[in-house]
Amino acid sequence: MSSTEQTPRPARLAAAAGVALVEALGLLAGGVYMLVRTLADGGDLTGGVTGGVTLVALGLIPLAAARGLWRLRSWSRGPAVITQVLALPVAWQMLQSDGVIPYGIVLAVLAVTGLVLLVNPATTEALGIRRPGQDAS
């Protein structure tokens, strides 16, 4: 294979990158919203800024993972899986709170879908990740 040819990207891997991108955009938007609202309302400045900056920083993880998955980088699967696993308890808490239940449902669906896509054999093969006991042929 020449250097200009590239391994084909399975649809499942592209979908996993899309899930990670949607989660990243949600975190980034939530962080920016929290920062703007805190600065505009003049509420708890320390808590609002800390929360907003934290959400923006957390949004960078699935954003990097989405980019890595799209570019077929094997390192990107780890942060993507961790993001999905951490999203599950957050979704559960959202499902227990009035007013954010629809967001909890969306997050739960994204997290489960992302996990299924990321552990799919076609995804791991495209990323060059070998299963335990698999030869390095």
Image: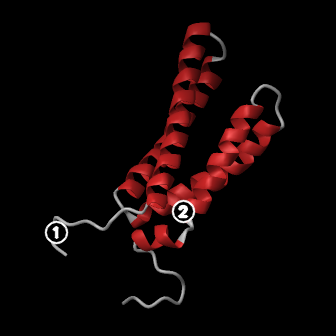
Q: In the structure shown, which secondary structural element does the residue marked by tag 2 occupy?
A: helix
Quickly name the residue at label 1. Answer: 3
Q: Residue at x 53, y 48 (%)?
A: 19
Q: Is residue 7 above or below residue 115?
A: below
Image disc number at residue 118:
2
Residue at 73 percent of width and 33 percent of height: 102
Counting from the top left corner in percent of width and height, residue 43 is at 65, 12
| Left or right: 115, with 65 as reference point | right
Label 1 sits on a secondary structure element that is loop
Does label 1 or label 2 sit earlier along the sequence?
1
Distance CA(mark 1)–CA(mark 2)? 26 Å
Residue 52: x and y in percent read 56, 28
Image quarter for residue 132? bottom right
65 vs 137: above or below: above
Using the image, determine if residue 65 lies above or below residue 101: below
In front: 5, or 40?
5
